[in-house]
Image: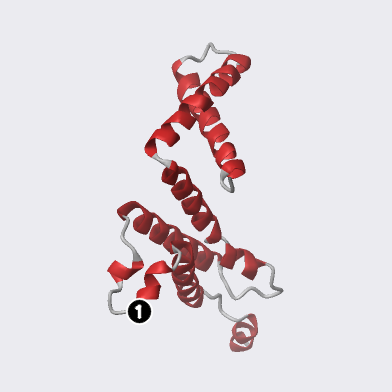
């Protein structure tokens, strides 16, 4: 029941994307109302697909989506600070590393227990989004340190 509201949004979005981005290029003469009707007709078909594939498909899709969105958090948090310690290159590096980790782990279905067998068994229960967030922060910090602009005061005093 908890996944019903987000699942319905994903279902409607998937149907709309299929109707608008797949069907419309194939049949450009279709009106907006015809594309909308097609999206409404596709929604139950997509629901049947998710049902036959098992309920875990939708849950996995939601978890992966939330893990991806979580990767924006460090850059957002640093952007709210008066003097952000994170550069734009650091933010990009962190997001790319975080998303890559989430994609790799979820697509290969390799858990952290298999990747790091020397760690305690509870490590296998860590959500991939959190572990990717930690790697995101490390990558962002390293890239930000490497791409920090030169201090203005030091540059001005060296020219005198």
- Looking at the picture, the colour scheme in use is secondary structure
Task: Compare residues 150 and 31 and report the one nearer the observer.
Answer: 31
Helix, strand or loop at mark 1: loop
| Residue appearing at x 44%, y 49% in the figure | 60
- Residue 48 lies, in percent from the top left, at 45, 29
Task: Left or right? Give the position of 10 relative to 105.
Answer: right
Say which residue label 1 marks.
120
| Residue appearing at x 44%, y 17% in the figure | 26
Image quadrant in which you'd find residue 16: top right
Q: In this view, which residue lies farthest toward the right?
A: 82
Q: Is residue 77 above or below residue 58?
A: below
Task: Left or right? Give the position of 70 relative to 100.
Answer: right
- Residue 57 lies, in percent from the top left, at 42, 44
Label 1: few (<14), some or many (≥20) within 10 Å? few
Q: In this view, which residue lies farthest toward the top?
A: 29
Task: Compare residues 87 and 11 and report the one nearer the observer.
Answer: 11
Image quadrant in which you'd find residue 110: bottom left
| Residue appearing at x 48%, y 48% in the figure | 59
Q: In this view, which residue lies farthest toward the front?
A: 1
Task: Compare residues 29 and 107 and report the one nearer the observer.
Answer: 107
């Amino acid at each position: 029941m908890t996944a019903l509201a987000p699942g319905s949004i994903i279902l409607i979005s998937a149907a709309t994307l299929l109707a608008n981005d797949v069907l419309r290029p194939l049949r450009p003469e279709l009106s907006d109302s015809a594309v909308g009707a097609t999206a409404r007709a596709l929604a139950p078909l997509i629901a049947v697909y998710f049902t036959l594939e098992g309920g875990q498909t939708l849950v996995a899709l939601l978890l992966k989506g939330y893990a991806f969105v979580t990767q924006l958090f460090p850059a957002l948090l640093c952007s709210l600070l008066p003097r952000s310690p994170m550069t734009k290159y650091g933010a990009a590096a962190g997001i790319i590393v975080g998303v890559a980790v989430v994609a790799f782990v979820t697509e290969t279905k390799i858990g952290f227990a298999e990747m790091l067998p020397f760690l305690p068994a509870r490590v296998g229960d860590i959500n991939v989004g959190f572990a990717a967030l930690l790697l995101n922060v490390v990558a962002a910090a390293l890239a930000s340190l490497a791409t920090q602009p030169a201090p203005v005061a030091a540059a001005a005093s060296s020219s005198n």
